[in-house]
Image (cartoon, rainbow, N blue to C red):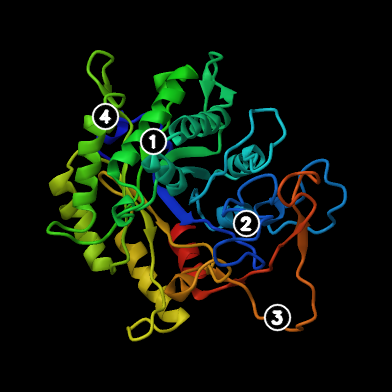
């Protein structure tokens, strides 16, 4: 790791990054729009503890099912970082969730207990609200401020606000370069500015601030994959008057930003990208792969789960953290058959098993609290999962 990368506060705690993209959607979710009781894809919270944890949340005496405890199981195979995609607006610390809010602190505590750091997303949903303008900006500011209050809801040894132990970094948007008409790079910079403003208002000391990333696609333009999109991020960040302030010595690009891309190329290509391609354009910028994997598309050399595992094994062997490259996230934890269609449904390390007895009930949990809106007291599936060959490959590389 170069000295330049360590200028970013709290980055060293993420190195080496042995990550997995985590979207544990239960089998009773659906291709968008989701059921009203779920309302989005955030399951990393107190409403769905049986997916990520071992037991119901304290106070839930009605649920008898045991939890699947994904976080403990991932930790056992060496995973120390999880890339999330949606983070519903949280309640004020210490308060019960209002309608359409989620409490993530029990989830973060469980991650911390298993030495797993979390990528907290400010999702594309908020980028679209910013892009639409009108009366939404103040609402987005308030939502991001609520996320900041939840994430920095503990104190350091000096009594200053600090991030709770399970948090690793902020992620603002995902693949803005593919969004085209719904939002753009300037909206991403604006969301980063709202984040900084909320952190400033909350008096977060500089030493306690978290790194920030914005994953971009691996689509190749006239430049190598990801490079132009990151260059445009740099331009937008440096042009934003909140993110770059000479008088306050604020340089968000240098002091907070970690680059990330989403490659699905083979190992040989990634080796060159890490050692030569990316450093040519950004010699002083730390970076990681926020998504890395392989689907099982028809008409290619990868047509089986075993071939998929073999392909990802070459990727993992080629992407051992070194220099300014801090690590990678395997895409992803679970085949997304409940939420998506096409090749997107084939990436996972795990899958829903075929039911041996069609009448056998799937274990369920209850969305908490009971009176919560929407879905309080309604059930969600806690599916037993079948490990694909890819699971063993990740275990071998990480553990």
Observer-nearest residue: 294 or 267? 294
On-image quarter of the N terminus:
top left
Residue 70, numbered circle: 2
Observer-nearest residue: 367 or 13? 367
Residue at image mark 1 = 191
Horizontally, is 284 left or right of 185 in the view?
Answer: left
Whole-Å distance between the Cαs marked 1 and 2?
30 Å
**Labels in figure, total:** 4
Image: 112 above or below 362: above
Name the residue located 44 percent from the left edge and 83 percent from the top edge: 304
Mark 2 or 4, closer to the camera: 4
- Element at label 1: helix
Q: Quadrant of residue 317?
A: bottom left
Mark 1 or 2, closer to the camera: 1
Local packing at callout 3 (Cα closer than 10 Å; few below 14, some 14-19, many 20+) is: few
Name the residue located 69 percent from the left edge and 59 percent from the top edge: 68
Whole-Å distance between the Cαs marked 3 and 4?
53 Å
Local packing at callout 2 (Cα closer than 10 Å; few below 14, some 14-19, many 20+) is: some
Whole-Å distance between the Cαs marked 2 and 4?
39 Å
- Element at label 3: loop
Local packing at callout 4 (Cα closer than 10 Å; few below 14, some 14-19, many 20+) is: some
Name the residue located 78 percent from the left edge and 56 percent from the top edge: 378
Cβ atoms under marks 3 and 4 closer than 8 Å: no
Residue 355, numbered circle: 3
Whole-Å distance between the Cαs marked 1 and 3?
44 Å
């Amino acid at each position: 790791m170069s000295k330049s990368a360590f200028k970013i506060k709290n980055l060293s705690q993420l190195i080496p990054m042995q990550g997995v993209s985590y979207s544990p959607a239960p089998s009773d979710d659906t291709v968008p729009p989701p059921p009203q009781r779920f309302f989005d894809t955030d399951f990393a919270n107190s409403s769905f503890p049986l997916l990520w944890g071992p037991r119901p949340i304290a106070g839930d005496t009605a649920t008898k099912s045991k939890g699947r405890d994904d976080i403990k199981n991932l930790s056992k195979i060496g995973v120390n970082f999880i890339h999330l995609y949606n983070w519903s607006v949280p309640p004020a610390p210490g308060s019960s969730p209002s309608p359409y809010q989620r409490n993530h602190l029990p989830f973060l505590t469980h991650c911390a207990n298993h030495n797993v750091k979390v990528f907290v997303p400010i999702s594309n949903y908020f980028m679209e609200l910013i892009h639409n303008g009108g009366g939404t900006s103040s609402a987005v500011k308030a939502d991001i401020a609520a996320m900041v209050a939840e994430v920095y809801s503990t104190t350091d040894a000096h009594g200053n606000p600090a991030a709770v132990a399970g948090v690793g970094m902020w992620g603002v948007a995902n693949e803005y370069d593919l969004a085209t008409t719904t939002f753009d790079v300037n909206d991403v910079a604006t969301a980063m500015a709202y984040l900084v403003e909320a952190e400033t208002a909350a008096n977060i000391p500089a030493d306690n601030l978290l790194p920030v990333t914005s994953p971009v696609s691996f689509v190749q333009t006239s430049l190598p994959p990801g490079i132009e999109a990151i260059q445009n991020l740099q331009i937008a960040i440096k042009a934003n008057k909140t993110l770059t302030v000479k008088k306050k010595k604020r340089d968000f690009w240098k002091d907070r930003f970690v680059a990330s891309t989403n490659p699905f190329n083979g190992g040989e290509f990634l080796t060159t990208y890490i050692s030569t391609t990316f450093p040519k354009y950004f010699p002083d910028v730390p970076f990681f792969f926020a998504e890395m994997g392989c689907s099982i598309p028809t008409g290619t050399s990868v047509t089986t789960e075993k071939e998929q595992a073999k392909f990802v094994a070459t990727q993992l062997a080629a992407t051992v953290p070194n220099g300014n490259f801090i690590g990678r996230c395997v895409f992803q934890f679970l085949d997304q058959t409940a939420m998506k269609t096409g090749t997107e449904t084939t990436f996972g390390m795990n899958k829903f098993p075929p039911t041996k007895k069609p009448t056998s009930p799937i274990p369920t949990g209850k969305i908490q609290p009971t009176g919560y809106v929407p879905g309080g007291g309604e059930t969600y599936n806690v599916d037993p999962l079948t490990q694909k060959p890819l699971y063993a490959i990740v275990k071998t590389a990480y553990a």
